[in-house]
Image: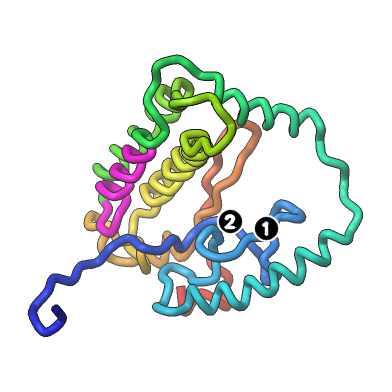
């Protein structure tokens, strides 16, 4: 009943970081195109209301156009050993009988940890707790995660297991990046660092790999974007 007083509160509802893309929506992995909340860059530090729909229309069209062009170009043949290893990883989930927890339970833990510690208001203690929780989950819970059934047909547990194997590392990276950013900017608010710090943090945090090691690089915002960062 909008004629009576009701409570309004802030909530985490949009992701402003993700896969790095160019103006054609192509990622740094040739042939991989991405659009929407899984991408980083179009909205800067905070999304303006309504911009997500505009982004889908603009970058969705560009992604489709340039993906079609890319699909016509000759490319290296798929690494068969890598493909076979990935197939084994996916199918191995169906054979687990270790007595570990179900994917839905682990997913609930991920969601609760993100909500409690990596949500609207963040601080060092909470982000440290989140990082530790995800490290433990990845090392101890994911290797023994168990499905209710080993069938391939309509096996939602299997789908959730695959999702959880991606969600946990991604959540850990988000928490670790937020912990490194010792300031508040856009949608990232830290109660222990409530002000922006342009001197140290007018930067994008890019996450990549160096061998088996995860690397965080703080890259200066391009000069033409600095005024709106």
**Residue at horizontal 36 percent and vertical 38 percent from the top:** 131
Q: Residue 37 at what x, y percent from top left? A: 50, 62
**Residue at horizontal 39 percent and vertical 46 percent from the top:** 175
Task: Please state if 106 lies on the left or on the right of 124 as rendered.
Answer: right
The residue closer to the viewer here, 162 or 225, is 162
Q: Residue 222 at what x, y percent from top left? A: 58, 70
Magenta segment, which residues? Answer: 107-122
Q: How dense is the environment of label 1, judged by Cα within 10 Å: few (below 14), some, or many (20 and up)?
A: some
Q: Which residue is mark 2?
A: 19
**Residue at horizontal 29 percent and vertical 50 percent from the top:** 115
- Residue 78 vs 147, above or below: the answer is below
Task: Please state if 84 lies on the left or on the right of 18 as rendered.
Answer: right
Q: Is residue 116 magenta?
A: yes
Q: Which residue is mark 1?
A: 27
Residue lying furthest right? 74
Residue 146 position by quadrant: top left
Q: How is the image coloured?
A: rainbow
């Amino acid at each position: 009943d909008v004629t009576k007083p009701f409570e309004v509160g802030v909530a985490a509802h949009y992701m402003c970081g993700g896969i790095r893309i160019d103006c054609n929506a192509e990622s740094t992995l040739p042939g991989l195109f991405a659009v929407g909340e899984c991408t980083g860059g179009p909205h800067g530090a905070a999304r303006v209301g309504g911009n997500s729909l505009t982004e889908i229309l603009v970058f969705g069209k560009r992604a489709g156009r340039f993906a079609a062009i890319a699909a016509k170009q000759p490319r290296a043949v798929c690494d068969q050993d890598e493909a076979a290893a990935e197939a084994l990883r996916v199918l191995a989930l169906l054979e687990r009988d270790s007595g570990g927890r179900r994917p839905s339970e682990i997913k609930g833990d991920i969601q609760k940890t993100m909500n409690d510690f990596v949500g609207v208001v963040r601080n060092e203690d909470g982000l440290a707790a989140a990082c530790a929780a995800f490290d433990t989950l990845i090392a101890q819970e994911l290797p023994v995660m168990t499905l209710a059934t080993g069938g391939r047909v309509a096996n939602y547990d299997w789908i959730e297991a695959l999702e959880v194997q991606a969600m946990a590392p991604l959540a850990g990276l988000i928490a670790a990046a937020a912990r490194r950013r010792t300031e508040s900017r856009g949608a990232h608010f830290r109660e222990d660092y409530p002000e922006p710090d342009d001197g140290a943090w007018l930067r994008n945090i890019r996450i990549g790999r160096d061998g088996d090691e995860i690397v965080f690089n703080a890259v200066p915002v391009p000069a033409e974007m600095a005024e709106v960062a």
